[in-house]
Amino acid sequence: MTPDARRETLRAALADVRARIDAAARDAGRDPAEVELLAVTKTWPASDVALLTDLGLAEFGENKEQEGAAKAEELTALRPDAVARWRIVGRLQRNKARSLARWAHAVDSVDSPRLADALDRAAGAALDAGERSGPLHVLVQVSLDGAEGRGGVDVDHVQALAERVDALAHLSLDGVMTVAPRDADPAEAFGTFAAVAERVRCAFPHARTLSAGMSGDLEAAIEHGSTCVRVGTALLGTR
Ligand SMILES: *Cc1c(COP(=O)(O)O)cnc(C)c1O
């Protein structure tokens, strides 16, 4: 596909996704401006990210540290003036913390105290080295079905992990994230998630982010209070 054709494809897909977000927010009696769109660009090239910044997007999600680091660097070469913030949305090994602290704005998939501690140390080291200018933003990932594979902490352990993150000097607790279980009713899952998020927000009023909803279920997530939908396929195509 030529760059111009790709630009048009992305422009049309973005308009569709925005229309879905707007309609879902209106149906829920919410202001669409409360719902942020995170473009999940994993497996797609930096040239696509550059086109998405041209279209006004500024938040990008990656699930692998190395792929994200390379893409962030390429984007800077392609669009030196673009404002882009990168979030890690996938399972993360602790030995990647130091590297990601150089380029990532946030980690949305924190699901253990050990990972939180490693990220705190890494962010502190990156701050000392002048490699970043602020804390690493963090969402606690919630597992709604207790399944191991996709990460997340059990509902019962969310509050303790949020406390741990909040107490760490170089992390900023922004809220919670979830991926709806594969064979659950999304409305029920997102309802449970909203209750978990509300408990966290009661204890930590600044932790206001509810990251929920992807290409296939963003309407149900917005109906249940999502403030950030993470969209890959509907924006960029099928991987
Ligand atoms: C890939 C991914 C997404 C995007 O999923 P799509 O169905 O392609 O929109 C969202 N969240 C996480 C954690 C992901 O890994």
Image (spheres, rainbow, N blue to C red):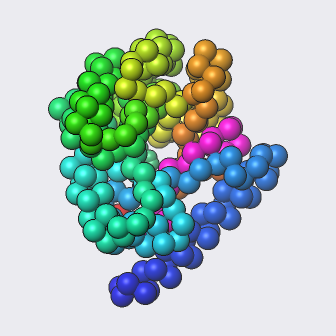
Residue 31 appears left or right of 235: right
The magenta stretch spans residue 228: yes
The location of residue 223, given as percent across then percent down, is 71, 43
The location of residue 54, given as percent across then percent down, is 48, 72
Q: Which residue shows up at 60% across the image and 27% down it?
A: 206
Q: Can residue 118 be seen?
A: yes
Q: Give the range drawn in magenta.
A: 221-236
The answer to which of 146 and 92 lies nearer the viewer is 92
Q: Residue furthest right?
A: 29
The magenta stretch spans residue 116: no
Q: Can residue 141 be seen?
A: no
Q: Which residue shows up at 27% across the image and 40% down it?
A: 130
Which picture quadrant has residue 4? Answer: bottom left
The location of residue 165, given as percent across then percent down, is 42, 20
The location of residue 90, given as percent across then percent down, is 34, 41
Tell me the quarter of the image containing the C terminus.
bottom left
Count up the numbered dots.
Answer: 0
Measured along the vertical axis of the image, is residue 235 above or below residue 114? below
Tell me the quarter of the image containing the N terminus.
bottom left
Q: Which residue shows up at 23% across the image and 57% down it?
A: 70
The answer to which of 93 and 97 lies nearer the viewer is 97
Q: Which residue shows up at 34% across the image and 17% down it?
A: 113
Which picture quadrant has residue 5? Answer: bottom left
Measured along the vertical axis of the image, is residue 109 above or below residue 170? below
